Image (tube, rainbow, N blue to C red):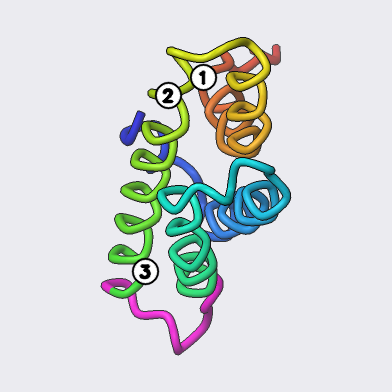
Amino acid sequence: MSAELSNLSPSTKADIARQIHSNLKAFEGCSEPGLRAFLPQLAAVADKLSISGEAATARALRTAEAEWAEIMIRLRGHISCPAKKMDAPTQNDGKAVLKPLLDALHTLRSPMPTVF
């Protein structure tokens, strides 16, 4: 998954982090401490990825992108692991939280149409 994630632009990654942050805040299961811990991490990494122009050095941007990928992988694992053991509504809640990430991955995996 991380190789595919590297194909997303920093601004797209920031948007995904913000959308997941919003979804997670609205998610009823966010009272769970493990999920709540992701809220400040998502907000911080979205801010780091949104810096542009002279303020954004290549090294800082690469660091923020690596941090973003790590957060997405850990969050996906944190949500999907318990959902495997639970009922379908719990699995659907997890998918709803991760929808922006899953949509981006689906777009990356979709074959590009050939134009002649």
Q: Of the numbered discs in the image, which one, if any, rests on residue 82?
A: 2
Which residue does the numbered mark 3 point to in the structure image? Answer: 61
Q: How many marks?
A: 3
- Comes first in the chain, label 3 or label 1: 3
Mark 1 lies on a secondary structure that is: helix
The local crowd at label 2, few if under 14, some if 14 to 19, many if 20 or more residues have their Cα within 10 Å, is: few
Residue neighbourhood size for the residue with mark 1, other residues' Cα within 10 Å, grouped as few (<14), some (14–19), many (≥20)? few
Evaluate if marks 2 and 3 touch, with contact meaning CB atoms under 8 Å apart. Answer: no
Q: Is residue 104 left or right of residue 73?
A: right
Q: At x 44% / y 13%, what residue is drawn?
A: 84
Along the horizontal axis of the image, is 64 left or right of 100?
A: left
* Amino acid type shown at disc 2: Pro
Residue 65: give x, y in percent of width and height. 37, 58
Is 13 rendered above or below residue 74?
A: below
- Dot placed on the residue nearer the N-terminal end, 1 or 2: 2
**Residue with the mark numbered 1:** 109
- The secondary structure that dominates the magenta segment is helix
Name the image quarter holding the N terminus.
top left
Q: Residues within 10 Å of mark 3 (few under 14, many from 20)?
A: some
Disc 2 secondary structure class:
helix
Task: Locate residue 107, reporting x and y percent.
Answer: 61, 26
Between discs 2 and 3, the one toward the N terminus: 3
Q: Tell me which residue sits at (68%, 44%) in the image.
A: 27
The residues bearing labels 2 and 3 have C-alpha atoms spaced at a distance of 32 Å
Q: Is residue 95 above or below residue 59?
A: above
The amino acid type, in three-letter code, at marker 3 is Leu
**Which range of residues does the magenta coloring cover?**
50-59
Which is more foreground, mark 1 or mark 2?
2
> At label 1, which amino acid type do we have?
Arg
Q: Residue at x 47, y 71 (%)?
A: 44
Label 3: element kind: helix
The structure residue drawn at horizontal position 36% and vertical position 47%, both measured from the top left corner, is: 69
